[in-house]
Structure formats: C-alpha cells, structure tokens
Image (cartoon, rainbow, N blue to C red):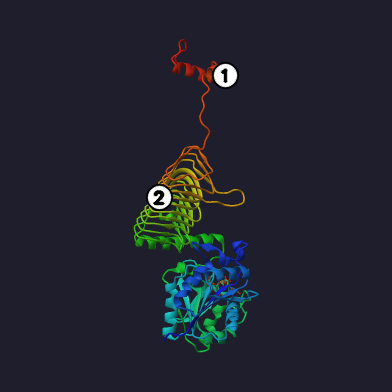
C-alpha cells in the first residue's frame, strides 16, 4: 500500500550558537545549505507536499527556498515553543494532509535519502502510527534517548535533561526524523504538554502518547550514526563538512576518480566528476562544475560552475563560470573569470586573466596577458604581456582577433578593434585601428640611436668602460 506522503521540515530556530547574522539552516556544506541538503534527501520519498516551518529570519529562509526548492511551501512559527509546536503549526495550516507525514530537522544535512526511504517503507509496511529514526552513538550527551521494554518494543523518548541515571546510560538516540500517520499525528499533537524541564512542546512525546492511545509505534535504526548529526555551532559545521567530504570522495574514488590527497580535496555534492579524472592535492570543485574523463586538475585549483572537457589539464588556477575545452591547458596561475570559453586544445598559461573571452581551438596565451571581452581565433598566438583594453571608463568593448593571428609581446589592443585572420601585430604596439588580414601592424615609435652618447654624457662610468672594451679601444683595462 503506497499512501500519500508529505514532509515537514523544521527550520524556525535562529541557531544562536552559530553566532551569525545568517539563520543556521542557510549555512553551507559542500554546495548546499543545511536545509538544502535536507530537502534534497526528503525528495526520495516522493512527497506530494514539502512544508518548511520558518521563524527566525523567515524572509531570508523563504528567499533561499524560492531559489533552491520552489516546490516547497512555508509556514510561519512566530515563537519557537518546541518541536511539537512547530509541527502543530504546519499541520494546522494544512488540514488536508493525510497518509504519511515525515518530520525532519532543517539542520541535519547528513541524513541519506536511502535512510528516509527505508524509514517510510518500514513505517507503511508495518502499519505503524509513529516510527522514529534512531541511531546508536558513543556519546549521546544532549540528545533524546529511546526507551524500550525488555522485548525491545519502543516505549518513549526521554530528553537528556529530563532523563534519570538509568535513561542517561541509553546509547540509542532520537535522530529527530519521524514518520507519522497524519491523523494520529494531529490527534496526539493536540495532547502535548509542556511538563518538562524546558517547558516546551516536545514532538518526541507523541511516541508515548500514540502508544498509550493504542497505536503501534516503532523505530528504524540507521547503520551510520553520523547521519543523525545536527549542527549547533561552527565547529560542528566543520565536522559535518568533513564527514560529507569523506562520503563524496569515497564514492568518487569508487567510481574511478583518482585523488592524490582526499583530505585536501573538497568537492561539492552538486559537482560531477567522470571516471579517470585525476585530482591533485588542494582541489576545490564547486557548484555546477563538471569534469570530463581524463582531465587532470590541480594541485591547488578552485573551479566554480566550470565545465572541463576530456583530457584538459588545469594547474594551480582559479576559474568561475568558465568552459575549458577538451585537451585545453590552463595554468599554472591562470584566472578564468565568468564567460571564459576555451576551445579544444587552447592554452592559457601563467598569470593570464580572461573574462567574457572565447579562445579558439589551439590558440595560445601562454604568459602574462589580459583577455577581456575578446574573441581569439583558432591557432592565434597571443604574446607575453598582451592586453585587451576593453573598458573606456564607462562602457566595455570587444576585441576580435582572427584565426592564425600573431599578437606581438606587450601590445595593447584598444577595443573596439579587430585584428584580421593571419595578421601580425609588432611587439610593443598600441593598436587602435583595425588590422586587415595578412597585414603587419606596427604602432610604436621608431628606434633612434644617438651615436656615442655614453662616451659624451657618462664618461668614466662602468657603462663607458664596457662600451670602450667592446669597441676594442686601447688603454682600457680588462674588467
Ligand atoms: C531534538 C530532539 C531530540 C533529538 C535531537 C536530535 C525534541 C524535543 N528533541 O533536540 O530528541 O535527539 O533533536 O538532534 O524534539 N525547531 C523549530 N521550532 C521550534 C523548536 C525547534 O523549528 O519551536 C527546529 C530547530 O530550528 C531545529 C530543530 O527543530 O532545526 C530541532 O530543535 P532543537 O531545539 O535544536 O532540538 P534539540 O534540543 O536538538
Ligand atoms: Ca539541535
């Protein structure tokens, strides 16, 4: 029997211990916010409705949800009177909810979708009224303990601060994730009291209340207790990030990715890396980055929203919203800014910055150049120190460089300007007019020589002596 399913995600708390102007659930762990990860895992149950309870900094949370999960709805909890109160508000706002309701916390991003799916499956198969996801942990300090009878049946949850010595010794904890029958949930939420140490409405009390009302309650234990970890402060945030890093890296290595040093390799959950990619130490791959097979990235490289073609090599570089073609070579020390597009086998080398630039197939800018708002034709050669002067202080202009063109070292191309196919620009030129295909443009002062200027103006200096020796003049001692 597959019934209707919905999810309620609690995200109303401010997270005071984060010491942040940003609400806790909007802090990021490898490519998604905390609540973004939770919404993603919850997708696995095919929930018809996803309801997020917001409170602290509600507008910021709503804005974020509209971006990453437009299908999610929000309900507003004005005062955080407890997890039970938060769920009540969601249920009251949606009296039509029926079937299975999954409740999860917005600050527990490591929960696997497979675990939520299993929780729901067991819950529905057994016909439970309430099923809690639990874990056995070494240190249950601060967490709710699951109390079972001698036969192992779940009796209730007791919060750490309400527990007696015997209950404190229990190592099975409440993860905070529940699957509930909507009708039973509604019925039992109405019976919650605040008779506990914190004076809050505890969602966890529904286990005991539902059981006492004659319903079946149960638990599903997750194998990996790290899935239940929440986030209260920045050191826990770093710990969650490290755990997720381990999961992502292990999975990628199993799929055929080589990592020289997984500990310094940070890959967002949103990134795609193909088999036979090699990642050197110190690589960060973020956002919508995708790396095709045979590519080699790093060491010390950060790529954000960047596509890397098969066989490309990117060394000690930084790229954002760039497209690096197949077999292209980038770095060391290149900076590819948004809308940089390198075609197949293009080369962008040391201290070259590109922005909104298309670098043609096999074209090279090997050293010290700025290519902004530019098109560089196939097989063109951009010399050392070439600059496209794209900005006149008000507007940006384009530079077009033709196929097989050769731009001599230290030239400035003042945009808008074009250099035709196969044209040459002499080193040190400042190009302000279009260059026709096949022409050589020389735009620099002609060289003049002032004969014997040193002898006349700098007599007796080391330069003068060197010059005299070179000319073979008598009476000058060997240096
Ligand atoms: C809760 C559980 C505990 C469990 C632990 C796991 C209860 C009573 N306790 O404790 O058994 O072991 O999580 O991490 O449920 N929230 C709201 N509105 C509220 C109160 C909380 O949206 O009125 C949200 C918080 O923002 C947070 C989540 O619910 O994301 C959990 O609340 P929190 O107060 O942190 O519960 P814990 O004390 O950690
Ligand atoms: Ca908590």
Which part of the image, by quadrant, shows the N terminus?
A: bottom left
Question: Going from the N terminus, do you reach mark 1 or mark 2 first?
Answer: 2
Neighbours of disc 1 within 10 Å: few (<14), some (14-19), many (20+): few
Expressed as whole percent of the image width and height from the top left, the position of residue 353 reads 50, 48
Picture quadrant of residue 350 = top left
| Image quadrant assignment for residue 246 | bottom left
Q: Residue furthest right?
A: 78
Report the side of 146 relative to 404 (left or right). Answer: right
x, y percentage for residue 121?
A: 42, 80
Q: Residue at x 48, y 19 (%)?
A: 467
Q: Would you say residue 228 is visible in this rendering?
A: yes
Comparing labels 1 and 2, the label whose residue is closer to the camera: 2
Query: Which of the 4 image quadrants contains residue 265?
Result: bottom left
Mark 1 = which residue? 457
Q: Nearer the viewer, residue 14 or 4?
A: 4
Which of 433 and 194 lies nearest the eye of the viewer? 433
Describe the element under mark 2 as helix, strand or loop.
loop
Q: Position of residue 205 (x, y in %)?
A: 55, 80
Disc 2 packing (10 Å; few <14; some 14–19; many ≥20): many
Real-space Cα separation, disc 1 to disc 2, in angstroms: 50 Å
Question: Residue 107: in sight, yes or no?
Answer: no
Image vertical order of residue 154 relative to residue 262, above or below: below
Residue named by callout 2: 378
Q: Is residue 188 above or below residue 50?
A: below
The spot of residue 105 in percent (x, y) is 53, 72
């Amino acid at each position: 029997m597959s019934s209707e399913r919905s999810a309620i995600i609690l995200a109303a708390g401010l997270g005071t211990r984060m010491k942040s102007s940003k609400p806790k659930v909007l802090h990021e762990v490898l490519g998604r916010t905390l609540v973004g990860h939770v919404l993603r895992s919850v997708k696995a149950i095919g929930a018809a409705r996803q309801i997020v309870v917001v409170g602290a900094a509600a507008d910021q949370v709503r804005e974020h949800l509209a971006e990453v999960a437009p299908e999610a709805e929000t309900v507003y909890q004005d005062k955080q009177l407890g997890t039970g109160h938060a769920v009540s508000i969601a249920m009251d706002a949606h009296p039509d909810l029926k079937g299975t309701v999954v409740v999860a916390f917005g600050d527990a991003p490591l929960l696997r979708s497979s675990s939520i799916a299993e929780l729901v499956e067991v819950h529905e198969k057994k016909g439970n009224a309430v099923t809690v996801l639990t874990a056995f942990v070494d240190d249950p300090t601060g967490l709710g303990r699951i109390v079972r009878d001698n036969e192992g049946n779940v009796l209730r949850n007791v919060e750490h601060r309400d527990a007696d010595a015997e209950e404190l010794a229990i190592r099975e904890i409440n993860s905070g994730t529940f699957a509930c029958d909507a009708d039973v949930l509604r019925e039992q939420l109405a019976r919650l009291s605040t008779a506990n140490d914190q004076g809050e409405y505890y969602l966890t009390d529904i286990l005991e209340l539902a059981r006492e009302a004659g319903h079946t309650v149960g638990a599903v234990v997750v194998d990996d207790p790290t899935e239940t970890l929440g986030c209260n402060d920045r050191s826990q945030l770093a710990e969650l990030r490290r755990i997720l890093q381990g999961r992502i890296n292990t999975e990628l290595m199993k799929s055929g990715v080589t990592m020289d040093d997984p500990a310094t390799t940070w890959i967002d959950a949103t990134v795609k890396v193909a088999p036979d990619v090699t990642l050197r130490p110190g690589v960060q791959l973020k956002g919508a980055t995708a790396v095709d097979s045979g590519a080699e990235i790093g060491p010390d490289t950060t790529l954000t929203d960047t596509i890397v073609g098969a066989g490309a090599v990117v060394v000690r570089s930084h790229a954002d919203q760039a497209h690096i073609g197949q077999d292209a070579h980038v770095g060391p020390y290149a900076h590819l800014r948004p809308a940089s597009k390198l075609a197949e086998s293009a080369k962008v080398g040391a201290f070259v910055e590109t922005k909104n630039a298309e670098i043609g197939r096999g074209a090279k800018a090997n050293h010290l150049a700025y290519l902004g708002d530019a098109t560089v034709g196939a097989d063109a050669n951009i010399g050392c120190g070439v600059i496209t002067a794209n900005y006149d202080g008000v507007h940006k202009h384009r530079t077009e460089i033709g196929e097989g063109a050769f731009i001599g070292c230290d030239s400035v191309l003042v945009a808008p300007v074009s250099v035709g196919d196969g044209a040459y620009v002499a080193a040190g030129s400042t190009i302000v007019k279009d260059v026709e295909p096949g022409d050589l443009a020389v735009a620099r002062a002609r060289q003049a020589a002032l004969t014997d200027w040193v002898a006349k103006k700098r007599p007796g200096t080391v330069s003068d002596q060197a010059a005299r020796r070179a000319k073979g003049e008598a009476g000058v001692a060997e240096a």
